[in-house]
Image (cartoon, helix red, strand yellow):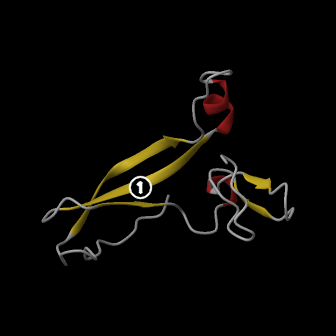
Amino acid sequence: MHQVPKTFCMRCYGTMESIGIEKIQLGQTGLLLGIWNNIFAGSMLVEIYVCSECGKVEFYTEAGDDSQKLPQKNCPKCERKHDFDYPKCPFCKYSYFD
């Protein structure tokens, strides 16, 4: 993963410092399938930055790395692809939980 230069916090303009690279688990746990949905969703490698002044946290992924992009799903209403973790389709606003 490339090194993101230290940046300034957008909240307080303090210095953002890297605290390391971690894998973040994607997905969610469910009532019927338990943790299996979470396990099969995969993970995303991110570099974590924190502001030394106010504690704001930011996550960065490697730009252009297709392996770090979120999985996609098709909306059942408009059939357009979007990130799997959206609660509503960003195009037609179909809600998956209503």
Residue 50 picture quarter: bottom left
Residue sitting at x 34%, y 50%: 20
- Residue at left offset 19%, top offset 71%: 15
Tell me where residue 91 appears, x and y as whole percent: 73, 71
The secondary structure type at the circle numbered 1 is strand
Q: Position of residue 82 (x, y in %)?
A: 73, 61
Q: Position of residue 79 (x, y in %)?
A: 87, 62
**To which residue does mark 1 refer?**
47
26 relative to 18, above or below? above
**Mark 1 residue crowding within 10 angstroms, few (<14) / some (14–19) / many (20+):** some
Would you say 52 lies left or right of 45 here?
left
For residue 8, side relative to residue 88 (left or right): left
Depicted 40 relative to depicted 72: above or below: above
In the image shown, does 29 or 69 lie closer to the viewer?
Answer: 29
Question: Given the image, on which type of amino acid does mark 1 rest?
Answer: Glu
Residue that sits furthest to the front in the current view: 98
Count the marks: how many? 1
Q: To which quarter of the image does residue 62 belong?
A: bottom right
- In the image shown, does 30 or 93 lie closer to the viewer? 93
Residue 89 vs residue 1, the one in the foreground:
89
Coordinates of residue 42 in the picture (x, y in percent)? 63, 38
Q: Is residue 34 above or below residue 46?
A: above
Which residue is pictured at 70% across the width and 62% down the height? 89
